[in-house]
Every structure is written in structure tokens, then in C-alpha cells.
Image: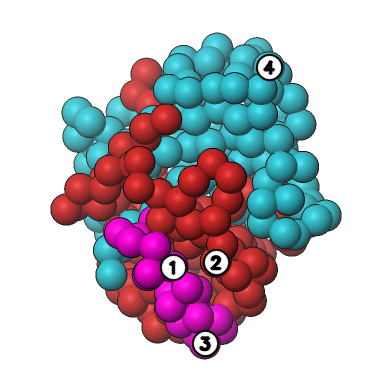
Chain colours: A red, B cyan
Amino acid sequence: MQQQLSVITLGIADLERSQRFYREGFGWTPVFANEEIAFYQMNGFVLGTWLTSRLEEDMQRPGLAHPGAFALAHNVASQDEVQPLIERLVTAGGLLLRAGDAPVHGGYRGYVADPDDHAWEIAWNPAWTIDARGLVTFAP
Amino acid sequence: MQQQLSVITLGIADLERSQRFYREGFGWTPVFANEEIAFYQMNGFVLGTWLTSRLEEDMQRPGLAHPGAFALAHNVASQDEVQPLIERLVTAGGLLLRAGDAPVHGGYRGYVADPDDHAWEIAWNPAWTIDARGLVTFAP
């Protein structure tokens, strides 16, 4: 079976507020948006932001909790880019969780929550390659 | 800025239980694993499963909640593959949330939670292309 994931869907409360964060913070453009969902074409998969009530209905699982036990990461090309991006995300409506610093395992990273409490790690990891299409390859 | 995500890290309680689900359910092999984390090389990004306590420490955010307001999706090539995969995931320690059926927007899908309560949608979506490397392209 393909070691493949097609979509990450984040539950959101307010489409406009969420799109402001992803558009003005990350600079990303939705490939599709209507009154309940926005899709972003990512590096080999799709990121969806969908009203939590609709996601709960679709999943048949009411009572989804915040903040969830997961983190998403966006890697940048150099250490110097980490803190400016964190600050831009906060300006765009994010919540600072951890300012950029160096973890023991190397590199540099900080964390920001999006307006719906979903955590994004902003990281510089010199060991991992990211090609021109944004495809990320693991290295130990 | 690249419309790129590098890692999805899921908080887990028990590495062996989690690996059984991903190995025997999805048939996936970690590219790296130690006593606190396992990484899976995916289609252009990396999936991490990390002890929740360590993720909370790294994120400086205690009290991560379950089930989080998000879903991951794995798409299959035909409608007939949805229900057998859901059943295999349940046998490997998953929890059935919704058996496969057809949503109004087309295709076919069901949901299973992994042993740490993270929801996976198993979907057939005839409109979206998935290439041989597993790279997924959005289509309306």
C-alpha cells in the first residue's frame, strides 16, 4: 500500500479569520474555497480547513477538543527565517507558543498556534532536504 | 513562500501499539524509530509519532486534548478498497468511527481512529489524481 496521506483537514470556527492567517501569515493561496471549507494545494497532498461542526458531522464524532495532540511543521531554508516567520504568523492572528530556539537534536524551531488552536512548528532542519516543489525527505 | 508542510507529528502514548497500527493496518514501515519517536517517509513530507509528553514539552504546551479537531486522510484507488482497509485498521487496533458510505459531494469514505484517537478518513475520490509516488493533486 502507498505510504501516502491525501488530506489534512483542520477544524475551524471562522473561515475568514482562518484564511487571513494562512494568506497573510504563510502567504498561501487556497486552490478552492466556499462558505464552509478552503483547500490549499500543498507539497503532494491537500490541506483543508473546514468548519468544525461539519467535520464532526462527517466524522460522526461530536465533541472534538482543542488543542489537539499533534503539531504541523513548516520548514524554512535557513535559521534566520524562523523568527521573522513566527512574528508574521502572530501578526496574522496566531498565538505564540514558543519563540525560536535550538533544540538538543539540532536545527532551530519555534511554535505558533493558528486562530483555531492548531499548532505549527516553524523549523530550520539542515539535515532534511526540501526540493523546488517543496517535497521533503527525511534524514536521520 | 513555499506552500509546503514538512512534518505532521501525532502525539502517542505507546510506541509499540502505535507502530502495530501503522505497520499492520496501513502496511507502512518507519524510516526511523527510537524509544520515543517513529518517523514515516510519506508523499513529500514526514509523518512523526512521538510520545505526547515529549511533544508537549517541545511545544511548551501541556494538556493536549483528545480527540483533536482534525482528520487525516488516506485515499485509495477504487471504492472497493475502502471498507477492507477500514476493517484491517480496526483489526490492527483502530476504532471504527464511521463505516464506508457515499457522501453527497461524491466518492466514498469512512473513518477510523488510530489507537491514540487520531482520526483517519479512508476515501476514494475519483476526481483527485494520485501519481505513482503518491503525490496528490486537488481537483474541484
Residue at (66%, 22%) from the top-left corner? B35
Would you say the residues marked 2 and 1 are in contact, meaning their CB atoms lie under 8 Å apart?
yes
Label located before the other in sequence (1 or 3): 1
Question: Residue A116: within the magenta?
Answer: no
Specify whether B111 is left or right of B96: left
Q: Secondary structure at mark 2?
A: strand
Q: Measuring from the top left, give residue B97's x and y in whole percent.
A: 68, 36
Residue appearing at x 55%, y 12% in the figure: B24
- Among numbered discs 3 and 2, the one appearing first in the sequence: 3
Q: Are marks 3 and 2 in contact (CB under 8 Å)?
A: no
The numbered dot on residue A100 is 2
Vertical placement of A39 versus B100: above or below? below
Q: Which residue is mark 4?
A: B16
Residues A65 and B54: in front is B54
The answer to if A91 sits in the magenta stretch is: yes
Residues indicated by labels 3 and 2 sit on the same polypeptide chain: yes
Q: Nearer the viewer, mark 4 or mark 2?
A: 2
